[in-house]
Amino acid sequence: FLLPSILAYDLGASSGRALLGRLNNRTIEVEEVHRFGNDPVVVGDRMHWDILRLYHDIKQGLLKAKHAGETISSLAIDSWAVDFGLVGRGGELLGNPYHYRDRHTDGVMERTMERLTASRIFGRSGIQFLPFNTIYQLAALKEADSPLLEQAKHFLMIPDLLRYFLTGEMHNEFSNATTTQFYNPVLGGWDAELLADIGISPSLFGNVVQPGTRVGQLRASLTEELGIDAIPVFAVAEHDTGSAVAAVPALERDFAYLSCGTWSLMGTEVDQPVMGELAQTLNFTNEGGVGGTFRLLKNIMGLWILNESHRTWEKAGLSYSFPELVALAEKAPAFRSLIDPDDPMFLHAGDMPSRIANYCERTGQQAPQSPGEFVRCILESLALKYRYVLELTERLSGKSFSGLHMVGGGIQNALLCQWSANAIGKPVWAGPVEGSALGNLAVQWIAQGELSDIWEARKVIRESFPVTVYEPRDGAQWEDAYGRFRALTGLSK
Ligand code: LFR
């Protein structure tokens, strides 16, 4: 290829990928140069990210791009949110970053909320209450009197940290910073009062840079090690959900999205955070995005429950592929067992089929028996939860949506897309699959003046990648199931 390429690393909770992107006459071409696993490592009672392995795979991506003969004009990284590393005096990473599903935060959110009150925390951050938010992870370290905090000089979130490894420069990126729940979007900076409340020094936190900022270049030791040129490194919406929403190929301003992967993130884009009492009660969040936008959304447990079920069956020697499981689900009886996917019992790693069976017993339903029945229960319950959250999004934002944009790896599951359309009674527009990586590329192109803004990027993405339309079907059955779902799960308005 003669056109310069840019490189996007998109790290998810179970795998990462390096994508090369080119803009050819306003058409985006992408090529995956490296895909790698991201397996958390459990040591004793603790669950960590394998951060050095991730860095190793980032280097592998650079080598593969070099071997493909590419000229790379810039690179950027996005990943899941909330997690971080602490860096000490000499610039070394202190310890292995914790996985947000580690249990060291058990009970910490509840204790912190009792002390600080929900309205103080939400009023200063606009962020939904999730037990693994950075604020509770830091409070947990504080409660445990962790020596890490005594030694720490810098706080870097996962992409900040990997960028620091690549460039030697430390910067805190905005979209990720907002997910800590101690970034104040009204004041436009870290909230020193919330930090003081949990006993964490504000000196750990650096200036916050916006997506699209150039934040260094590959350091000399690395370019020598790999035998490559120094490549400029950019901050993008380094929170993967921020990048995914930047890539939603919407034509209309008032659109609803569902970023579908390990998590299902559903909501709408707004210009100002929505921080009133209703947002707090409904536990919506306002995560910072590209070009001054915010994502008014709610986390839904997503395909995590299916992935963990798959892992449980594999351990038991039952090896089904995901397409096989989905085919079995399609044949299983409809709406026999329903769960609230966001019940806290499904948050931590473990035996999901047993937990689903417990949930069903507790709610007086017949428990699924076979893998097909379990998967049916998971997918139907997700689709019904999507309807619930979509209705809340409309209520809170005062918008009304004519359909739902679905992006991300989860849309490869056509059954889930169809059932989502059935549940919401509106069309689902599914695509693109590589949402986060495309949003990452788009912000680099905007920064380099190749695209004017996020709306032009969305248009180019729409013209470059197919969108599959799923029209709603079986309305009466889904309506009936929704009523049962609401009653069983206790989800009221
Ligand atoms: C999705 C995501 C969600 C965030 C969760 C944990 O990958 O980034 O937006 O709530 O992971 O970080």
Image (tube, rainbow, N blue to C red):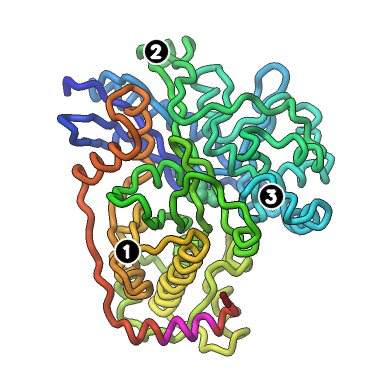
Three-letter code, disc 3: Gly
- In terms of secondary structure, where does tag 3 sit? helix
> Disc 1 marks which residue?
403
The quarter of the displayed image where residue 62 is located:
top left
Q: Label for residue 123? A: 3
Q: Residue at x 68, y 33 (%)?
A: 95
Which residue is more in the foreground, 177 or 162? 177
* Main secondary structure type of the part rendered in magenta: helix
Looking at the picture, how far across and down is residue 41, in whole percent?
58, 46
Looking at the picture, how far across and down is residue 6, in whole percent?
31, 26
Which residue is more in the foreground, 46 or 176? 176
Is-magenta flag for residue 219?
no
- In terms of secondary structure, where does tag 2 sit? loop
- Say which label, 2 or 1, has the lower sequence index: 2
- Tell me which segment is drawn in magenta: 480-486
Three-letter code, disc 1: Gly
Looking at the picture, how far across and down is residue 486, in whole percent?
52, 80
- In terms of secondary structure, where does tag 1 sit? loop
Looking at the picture, how far across and down is residue 353, in whole percent?
52, 73
Look at the numbered discs 2 and 1 and tell me whether their residues touch, using CB distance below 8 Å: no
> Disc 2 marks which residue?
230
